[in-house]
Amino acid sequence: MPVAPGAAEDRAEMRRLHRLDEAEALAPLLRAAALPPERGRRVHMRALELVRHARAAHRPGADVSVFLAEFGLDTPEGVALLCLAEALLRIPDAATQDALIEATLGGADWQAHLGHADSLAVNASTFAFMLSGRVLGLEESRAVPGAIGRIVKRLGEPVIRAALRHGMRVLARQFVMGRTIAEALGRAGDTDGRRWRYSFDMLGEAARTAADAARYFDAYREAIGAVGQASAGRGPVEGHGVSVKLSALHPRYEALQADRCVPALVGALTALARDAKAQDIGLTVDAEEAERLEISLDVFAAVRADPALDGWEGLGLAIQAYQKRAPAVVEWTAALARRTGHAIPARLVKGAYWDTEIKQTQVQGLPDYPVFTRKAATDVSWLACARRMLELRDALRPAFATHNAHSLAYVLELSSGVGIEAQRLHGMGEALYERVVARGEAPVRVYAPVGSHEDLLAYLVRRLLENGANTSFVHRLVDAEVPEEAIVADPVEAARAGPARHPRIPLPAALYHPDRRNSRGLDLADPAVREPALAAVRAAAARDWSDAAQRRGPSREVRSPADRAALVGTVREAGPADLDAALAAAAAAWRGWDARGGAARAAVLERAADLIEAHRFEFLALLAREAGKTLPDGHAEVREAADFCRWYAARAREWFGPPRELAGPTGERNTWALAGRGVFACISPWNFPLAIFTGQVAAALAAGNAVAAKPAEQTPLVAALAVRLLHEAGVPREVLHLLPGDGPSVGAPLVADPRVAGVAFTGGTETAQAIARSLAARPGPLVPLIAETGGINAMVVDSSALPEQAVQDALTSAFGSAGQRCSALRVLCVQEEIADRVLGMLAGAAAELRVGDPLDPATDVGPVIDEEAREGLEAWCRGLATAPLFEVPVPPDVARRGTFFAPRAYALPSVRALTREVFGPVLHVVRWRGGALDALLDDIAASGFALTLGVHSRIESVQRRVAERLRVGNTYVNRNQIGAVVGVQPFGGHGLSGTGPKAGGPVTLIRFATELTVSVNTAATGGNASLLALDAGGV
């Protein structure tokens, strides 16, 4: 892979800053951004002048700032607007459009906004936005649902629908320069001779398929040619340009897929850059999510080093100030410019993915955020980077993108407008920049999005989110209630006055504070983390993982499903004597463990969680080799096991303390307490050999029981390591016993033994039913069974869903962990009106999956667990007697070594045709017509399973309708349906899917315990002393 000489040498500081403590990252930026008092005063006065001029010169309807201020995201109307903007234009069928309109507009008070502002966009958009230049009035009543009914009766649903679609197009036109590059260039030519430059951004979602990437590449190429002609030789500085998103050029633009995406992206971007050079225009690479930063720099450096581009200084890079790495990226870019001998246009932006970065960091449990959590800190970072870029004008051609008057005044003051360019977005900030242009203070470039209405949706929503927030400058500028001084406040002073970190955005580790600590994540996208982690995993994978415990059963080899020739280790299984000795010891020891109390047991489990995390690389290696888990899946399982330990520790403290006194009549004392039951048999499956095994064991231990744990026969070595760590954490050996072996030899006699006081089981429904019969047939006490079984899990997708999101979530849910999750998607139900598009995209996205060695971080899908599982899947597919809709190829050398099964999908005529759970990477697809949702839900419910359900719809009433009709254990809306998080999404079903309670739920431990109530007659000694004492001295 070609990379500019030395390009990788400048990453050390970048990696140091990546997730640095916020206060530590901010301190040098505050020093760098601060100005001497006199210069600071001049910036302040200049910013005030800009704001006053912008407010005075603002022309209602010229841009959408008044519109956004009126319909803020803190109002129901703003939320309704966001929903409509995101979905209405892409919905193909009238019925779903009408349902969305009713659901989003019905609860909003649109009349309150009529006449509230001077802007035509506000008043004409209220309720129906525009229809023949007049508002569909709501003056008659503030009861909007009633008004909707009256208007529909008067004008008819088609008219309302057309009005709203037209209104959305009017709104879109405010943000988007044109549907085509020709239309956008035409609008750019009608700017009354003002000195605007344009950079055209071809809109669209990230490529999901190779076909998407090819389509976007062609669109960029067409744009470069058209812009070059329109720019008429003015060059990259004076003329128009084009911006490009790398995510549009490759469907797997991911750090873990760098070996294939980086060379492909270098090739694509080089071709575009050569076209841009030939046209003598600029080409800027946009910044995207933080995890893609380093590979984007690899691509950029390689393209900049292309000899064919010598003499052209139009290849530019966007730099996000909200990233803590921004100062290092500025230095890296300047160093690259000097190495290659070409100045680099550097576009400084605040950043557009802040909310995504915060959420993803929390979800992944990473040490800190890659972005600043306070807006003032981002503004300070922008100022510090801007100042440094001005110092580097020998290497950089700085461009400063902002709609903030203080930020703009700052760079104008420091640069005197020399050697810089200011930038704004089309449809925003025009009033602010008119004075700058009129006075010739700096050239201004307008970032101008181009795309069809379907392609603009994600961009439009991002703009609405950014500028509808009441903290945004655009929002505050047009809000007359906000004083000018507040608008131009110095962010350096604001940052110094407040805490470095936002007080309402905790670190991921403290997400559940004070209840428990969150489990540690592993950022495999970060090379500074990934490289040592992989080295540790490979070293652990080379070890012999044989279980050294001496038992009396047969010794058995454990081989890897990814390579049947590879010996993972050996295990000696439990014989009858081992089983008897374990149960005898456990029966004798459980009362002492129970007597320790919940707090003491909690401390042991918390130590176990720490040990599990400390040994995570050993677990990753063992999970990959013994269970075929990919590294991301394996680490998610390590986190889940640690979460189980900490969650049940917290619940033990909550529920298993001193007896609780209950309310009652005077003269008696009533208490309630929980205690252990005795010996619990915990029987776990191979598909989550660490998480489910640990979860069962930790729950039973937390409740005060002893445990006899039987792991799946395929994965005893993972369990052996987990038990060793639990013992090391302080669980007495006589309290926790590992009994490896198969079902008939160990599982059946364990369940039948009268010393077992409870059974926790996860596995197949038929096995759970056999255990229930065995327990019912036992003489003596009734024994509780806690069973979590499988499901024929459906995902319902209606035509309001975003196809790209539905496809990604279906792909993850169906093929993640090779489909070997009880929560996995088994049947995808897509509304007919969008089915062709969704299924075509699904096939294209599936074609990009990698099936292979689970120890390779680039692998998406590993093997199925054994040959029996593979043969069962093949038999099921043969029985369908139809060709698959698609099948992901398995490389022949991979297929020969292990028990791999190609992920695939089949069309079914009805959900009822899926008669059993198919446990593997086989997705079934059913089409359903709009209007037939209830019949579809009846078919899904008829299976009798009730474990997980996915719903993709933008219509809340549809979401509720599906969830309430099916009433499954875990319903997931507009996301994937796997990966339940302990304590956040308690997991488990009912019906054929289990008995409850849910794993990782608030009341799980009660089922593992027995309840004890004690009532004491305190008046039995001859009188009620406490009652008589009430009036002592007062009679």
Image (spheres, grey):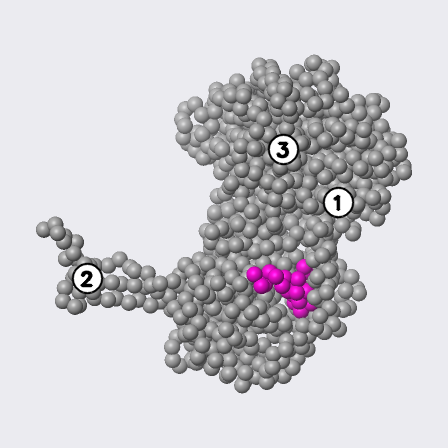
Of residues 544 and 208, the one drawn nearer to the viewer in this rendering: 544
Q: Are marks 3 and 1 in contact (CB under 8 Å)?
A: no
Q: In the image, 341: left or right of 512? A: right
Asked whether the viewer can see residue 508, the reply is yes
Residue at (14%, 67%) from the top-left corner?
1022
Q: Position of residue 658 (x, y in %)?
A: 35, 63
Look at the picture and state if 614 lies above or below 168.
below
Asked whether the viewer can see residue 91, the reply is no
Q: Position of residue 1005 (x, y in %)?
A: 44, 64
Q: Mark 3 or mark 2: which comes first in sequence?
A: 3
Q: Position of residue 57 (x, y in %)?
A: 60, 14
Please tell me in which quadrant of the rendered image residue 331 appears: top right
Residue at (71%, 67%) from the top-left corner?
541
> Label 1 sits on what residue type?
Arg
Q: Which residue is mark 1?
A: 11
Look at the picture and state if 214 lies above or below 164.
below
Q: Secondary structure at mark 2?
A: loop
Q: Position of residue 23 (x, y in %)?
A: 59, 40
Q: Which residues are magenta?
A: 610-631
- Closer to the observer: label 3 or label 1? 3
Majority secondary structure of the magenta segment? helix
Please tell me in which quadrant of the rendered image residue 890 appears: bottom right
> Label 2 sits on what residue type?
Gly
Residue at (65%, 30%) from the top-left corner?
33
Numbered tag placed on residue 667 in the rendering: 2
Query: Distance of mark 3 from mark 1, alpha carbons?
Result: 23 Å
Q: Secondary structure at mark 1?
A: helix
Q: Count neighbours of disc 3 (C-alpha within 10 A) and say few if under 14, some if 14 to 19, many if 20 or more.
A: many
Look at the picture and state if 314 lies above or below 1020.
above
Image mark count: 3
Q: In the image, 1031: left or right of 1000? A: left
